[in-house]
Image (spheres, rainbow, N blue to C red):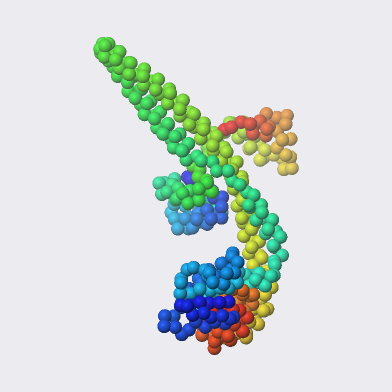
Amino acid sequence: MRVVVARQEFVGRAIDLRPRPTPIDGETAVAAVRRGGAEAGSDTDTGTDMAAGDPRVRVRCRPPGPVHEFVGHLAAETTVPLRRALAAAARSRGLSAPQDDALRDVRAELADCEVPSIERREARRRAAAAGDEVERLRERVATLRGRVETLRDLGREAEADEVAADLATAATRLSEVETERDAAAQLLAELEEREREARDVRERRLRLEDRAANLERAARRSLAASVYDRFQDAVRRLPGDAAPGDEPGAFSGDPVTAALAVAAVADVTAPVVLATRRFADASTAAARLDAPIIRV
Amino acid sequence: MLLVVTYSRAARTTLRNACRTHEGATIRQLGRAALLAETEFGAFLALRLREKHGDDVQIERTAPFNEFEAVPERVRAAAAAYESREQPSTPYTRFASGTDHPSPASMRDREL
């Protein structure tokens, strides 16, 4: 790897960026590693055009694999979810899990699961509005009818005829609005029916998602188990006070030691940013973790 | 009551958390579904779920089931008679044939 900090260039498998007038913090260094690695993964080598970002630190290195998410930055407060981290470490070594074929199938089925989207919100709004309008007009028709009767009883025929004309208009409007309401209700019912069918697909997708999650969990368990003896060895020979136990749930002791041991187990391609005093220097760390190291 | 059914892992998690946080508005929590109180607050919770997870959330409004109001006498009688049959192994279709009890097919075709 190659690291450039403020026009100063470092090359090698173990690089120490201390001491500096303004120290480089771990996050900055990790971000530079991930940018540099991503660029190396996507681009051909030009040697001079290094990834943009924080201009103070630039890194050229191999692309970080998934395990780098867990062990890319080792600091005094580092903790790793042990089973997940060990599973990623096992993958980095090219190991596979017995669930891999089934997982691939389930993921392919999931990718094929297309849930039709049926927009019903506007239909609901329309059906509700049409219902309200019917209610309003019904009340108006009833009121006008009452008034016509009252006027006729009082013998005020001219006025009664006038109100009767309003009543006829309102009654016509009511029947129109009732038709609209029925149509809106019908449309909504049809959309709901289609949504019910779409829910069968959603149901199937949820089952597949659950199955994928179970397989992933089982795969992690199996992968973590397959490297656990290496992990135990690493915990015993690396600095720090910890007892590995015989499975990830049984680990007890220093969480930083666990993270260091995961790094030692993994085949780490991109540099690990080390911000703890567990090793005398960067070269010792690189040798004992068998990984490229940037010490900050 | 408001019946809320979820159709994705994320929606299911949100529903479970909502039920745990708002026990007062939760009448029952049944795996990935829940019955919420028919209050504005119950509706508020249900609508928030739908805002967040779209059609992965189904909301229905339930009503108590009154068989004397909604179900014809012949269906009620058939259910009672079949559950007190003498031969537990008799399937309903055979039990009903040659009697006044409705056939499963005829019941399937009739909406309540």
Can see residue A146?
A: no
From the viewer's perspective, tell me whether residue A146 is left or right of residue A29.
left
Q: Position of residue B23 (x, y in %)?
A: 45, 55
Q: Quadrant of the N terminus of chain A?
A: bottom right
How many tags in the picture?
0
Picture quadrant where residue B101 is located: top right
Query: Residue B7 location, x and y as percent?
Result: 56, 50
**Looking at the image, residue A289 lies above or below residue A62:** below
Instruction: Return the x and y of residue A213 as percentages of the image width and height.
Output: 62, 60
B20 with respect to A270 (left or right): left
**Residue B105 visible to an observer of this rendering:** yes
State the image quarter where residue A12 is shown. Answer: bottom right
Residue at (59, 32) in percent of width and height: B111
Q: Residue at x 60, y 35 (%)?
A: B76
Looking at this view, is A36 or A222 the one in front? A36
Q: Quadrant of residue A288?
A: bottom right
Q: Is A66 on the left or on the right of A5, as rendered?
A: right
Look at the picture and state if A186 lies above or below A35: above
Q: Nearer the viewer, residue A273 or A253?
A: A273
Which residue is depicted at the point 63% across and 31% down? Answer: B109
Q: Return the x and y of residue B37 as percentages of the image width and height.
A: 45, 48
Residue at point 61% right, 79% down? A291
Residue closest to the eye, A148 or B48: B48
- Name the residue at the bottom extreme: A280
